[in-house]
Image (spheres, rainbow, N blue to C red):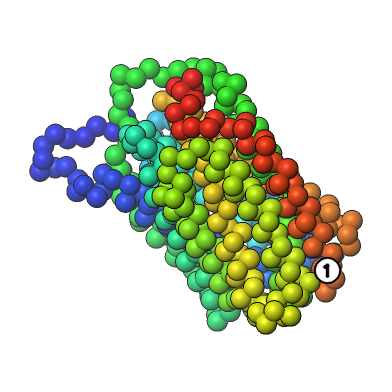
């Protein structure tokens, strides 16, 4: 555990001991993660069918399901949390350099999977630091919201600049930009050593089995149920590119709007819903997600044309009002899991939650691919996509009563600690 000097002259500045540095690094991670999104959307749509695109996304983001393995290395390893970030991101820059030099699409996809493994490892390290920092606060929502807001800001900036780079300069700019961002992230990560974390040296470290209480298992089960709802985000992007002919800059702008909406959702969670039950917040979010389905369905049917609203504006409204309740849905679940992150197992417990979410999301993406195959979706023939949106909305509505599987209050599940 990091020891701090008592001499006032050698203490780092106060802002370095707060969540500011952690927020800056999460901003960089968000930018690194989102920058190549538009590039991949166009690359895959130009070379594969809708069903294949869904399946490829499953493979590309599969490294995120082994985050508990990374977390055990961080929790039990000899290195400080921040050291893993400082070591991993230069490797990410080298991977993007290799992608830049590669000319085969299959090799490029394979190298990107390797890059996602490095970024997911760094993500686990940052999450572990966040959990440790949250333990110093009476209300962990403040730290959680602060950090995730800045990650969303980074993703918004990355998504927009990535789309702009793709539109103006082509693929080569995306490769070069990803290398620069990875190096920048490494430089910012050097500040992480000054983030103040929990220093309860006398607190006992419980056995990992003691953490897996029935309450935690119920919370994880609900997490899986929320994320297993068929995901059709890749299919919708395919529709926007192939049928509506959206340019890279417009697609990047829509992604940016979605991430800005995530910021709005985080602020709603930390401010407007302050002190509210987790169950109530989640039920409200599930209901909004179910109703919001009308916006993408309306875009597919062309309702915006009859109402005099441009396709771009309607798609922007859809992206905003879909992302806000999604963030309102996820953050209370995150907050519930934070309470179970016992000393010595902070990274592991939180990583199990995120990995389970990722496993369910990959399975949901596969379900989306399966449904797209049965509906016969193809380039220029995406009309039946509205059926999947209606099914997705109905499933979220059915999950409303299951929200009671989560603890209702922030302090209602101390049996794990």
Where's residue 147, x and y in %? 41, 49
Q: Quadrant of the C terminus?
A: top left
Which of the 4 quarters of the picture holds residue 321?
bottom right
Q: Is residue 99 left or right of residue 143?
A: right
In terms of depth relative to the viewer, which is nearer, 283 or 364?
283
Which of the 4 quarters of the picture holds residue 196?
top left
* Residue sitting at x 60%, y 68%: 317
* Residue sitting at x 30%, y 19%: 202
Q: Is residue 132 visible?
A: yes
Asked which secondary structure carries label 1, the reply is loop
Q: Is residue 249 left or right of residue 73?
A: right
* Residue sitting at x 56%, y 40%: 280
Where's residue 392, x and y in %? 74, 52
Q: Is residue 116 above or below residue 127?
A: below
In terms of depth relative to the viewer, which is nearer, 315 or 159?
315
In terms of depth relative to the viewer, which is nearer, 59 or 309?
309
In terms of depth relative to the viewer, which is nearer, 94 or 288?
288
Where's residue 28, x and y in %? 43, 58
Q: In this view, does 148 lie above or below 171?
A: above
Q: How crowded is mark 1: few (under 14 residues within 10 Å), some or many (20 or more)?
A: some
Q: Quadrant of the N terminus?
A: top left
Where's residue 279, x and y in %? 56, 37
- For label 1, the residue is 383
* Residue sitting at x 59%, y 49%: 285
Q: Is residue 347 visible?
A: no
């Amino acid at each position: 555990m990091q020891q701090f000097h008592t001499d006032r002259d050698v203490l780092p500045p106060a802002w370095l001991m707060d969540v500011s540095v952690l927020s800056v690094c999460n901003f960089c991670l968000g930018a690194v993660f989102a920058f190549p999104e538009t590039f991949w959307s166009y690359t895959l749509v130009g070379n594969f069918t809708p069903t294949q695109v869904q399946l490829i996304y499953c493979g590309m983001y599969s490294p995120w399901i082994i985050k508990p393995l990374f977390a055990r290395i961080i929790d039990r390893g000899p290195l400080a949390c921040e050291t893993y970030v400082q070591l991993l991101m230069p490797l990410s820059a080298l991977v993007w350099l290799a992608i830049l030099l590669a000319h085969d699409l299959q090799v490029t996809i394979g190298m990107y999977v390797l890059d996602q493994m490095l970024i997911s490892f760094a993500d686990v390290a940052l999450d572990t630091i966040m959990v440790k920092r949250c333990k110093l606060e009476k209300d962990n929502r403040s730290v959680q919201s602060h950090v995730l807001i800045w990650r969303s800001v980074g993703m918004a900036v990355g998504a927009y600049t990535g789309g702009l780079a793709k539109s103006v300069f082509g693929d080569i700019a995306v490769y070069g930009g990803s290398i620069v961002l990875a190096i920048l992230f490494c430089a910012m990560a050097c500040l992480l050593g000054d983030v103040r974390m929990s220093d309860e040296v006398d607190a006992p470290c419980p056995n990992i089995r003691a953490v897996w209480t029935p309450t935690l298992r119920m919370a994880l089960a609900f997490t899986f149920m929320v994320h297993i709802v068929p995901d059709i985000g890749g299919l919708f992007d395919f529709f926007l590119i192939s049928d509506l002919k959206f340019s890279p800059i417009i697609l990047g702008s829509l992604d940016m709007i979605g991430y800005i909406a995530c910021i709005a959702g985080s602020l709603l969670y930390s401010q407007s819903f302050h002190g509210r039950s987790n169950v109530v917040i989640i039920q409200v979010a599930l209901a909004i997600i179910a109703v919001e389905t009308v916006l993408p369905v309306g875009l597919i049917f062309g309702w915006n044309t009859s109402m005099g609203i441009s396709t771009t504006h309607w798609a922007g409204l859809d992206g905003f009002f879909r992302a806000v309740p999604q963030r309102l849905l996820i953050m209370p679940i995150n907050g519930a899991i934070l309470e179970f992150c016992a000393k010595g197992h902070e990274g592991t417990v939180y990583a199990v939650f995120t990995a389970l979410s990722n496993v369910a999301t990959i399975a949901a993406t596969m379900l989306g691919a399966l449904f797209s195959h049965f509906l016969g979706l193809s380039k220029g023939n995406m009309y039946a996509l509205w059926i999947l949106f209606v099914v997705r909305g109905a499933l979220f509505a059915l999950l409303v009563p299951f929200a009671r599987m989560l603890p209702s209050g922030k302090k209602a599940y101390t049996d794990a600690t």
